[in-house]
């Protein structure tokens, strides 16, 4: 991650969601990398540092919440945003910001700005 643009790792088992979110992020000047499952995401996290990691709560039969906790073990300062299509806001239980799918472009960008501003 060397372009100077904030780097975002998008972790979702849906290729369509990964592609749409990555394209939106790149259009807004972010550097987007994607992973489709926990193993790919953990490998990516070990290879590079990301400004923010977007993780779907349900990754096929894997838990995005468990992945978020494993990422925190590897990179304790990681900024993580959870995404969920279930309509249930897990932020009070996880302490992590949450985007409920389907989310609007501005919801995603506002959430990213808030998380990135915390780091500044």
Image: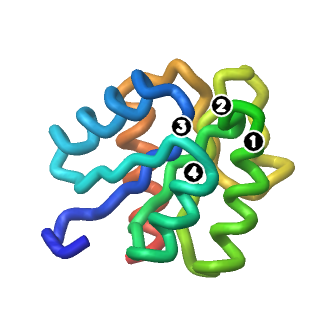
Instruction: Name the residue carrying label 1.
Output: 62
Q: Is residue 22 above or below residue 96?
A: above
* First in residue order: circle 1 vs circle 4: 1
Q: Residue at the location (51% across, 45% down)?
A: 11
Instruction: Name the residue carrying label 4.
Output: 81
Q: Is residue 82 above or below residue 119?
A: above
Q: Badge 1: few (under 14), some or many (20 or more) residues near its Cα, within 10 Å? A: some
| Alpha carbons under labels 3 and 1: distance apart | 11 Å
Q: Quadrant of residue 85?
A: top right
* First in residue order: circle 3 vs circle 4: 3
Q: Secondary structure at mark 1?
A: strand
Q: Is residue 70 above or below residue 110?
A: below
Tell me residue 46's x, y (percent).
Answer: 50, 76
Q: Badge 3: few (under 14), some or many (20 or more) residues near its Cα, within 10 Å? A: many
Q: Secondary structure at mark 4?
A: strand
Instruction: Name the residue carrying label 2.
Output: 84
Q: Quadrant of the N terminus?
A: bottom left
Q: Which mark is residue 12?
A: 3
Q: Residue at the location (78% across, 41% down)?
A: 90
Is residue 114 shown left or right of residue 80? left
Q: Quadrant of residue 116?
A: bottom left
Is residue 24 shown left or right of residue 105? left
Q: Secondary structure at mark 2?
A: strand
Q: Residue at the location (24% across, 55% down)?
A: 31
88 vs 13, nearest the viewer? 13
100 vs 48, nearest the viewer? 48
Q: Residue at the location (36% across, 41% down)?
A: 109
| Alpha carbons under labels 3 and 2: distance apart | 10 Å
Q: Secondary structure at mark 3?
A: loop
């Amino acid at each position: 991650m060397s372009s100077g643009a904030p780097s975002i790792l998008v972790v979702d088992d849906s290729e369509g969601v990964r592609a749409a979110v990555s394209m939106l992020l790149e259009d807004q000047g972010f550097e987007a990398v994607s992973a489709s499952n926990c193993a790919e995401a953990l490998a990516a996290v070990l290879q590079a540092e990301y400004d923010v990691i977007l993780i779907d709560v349900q990754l096929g039969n894997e838990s995005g919440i468990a992945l978020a906790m494993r990422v925190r073990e590897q990179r304790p300062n990681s900024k993580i945003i959870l995404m969920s299509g279930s309509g249930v806001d897990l932020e009070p239980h996880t302490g992590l910001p949450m985007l409920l799918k389907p989310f609007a472009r501005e919801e995603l960008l506002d959430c990213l700005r808030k998380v990135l501003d915390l780091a500044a």
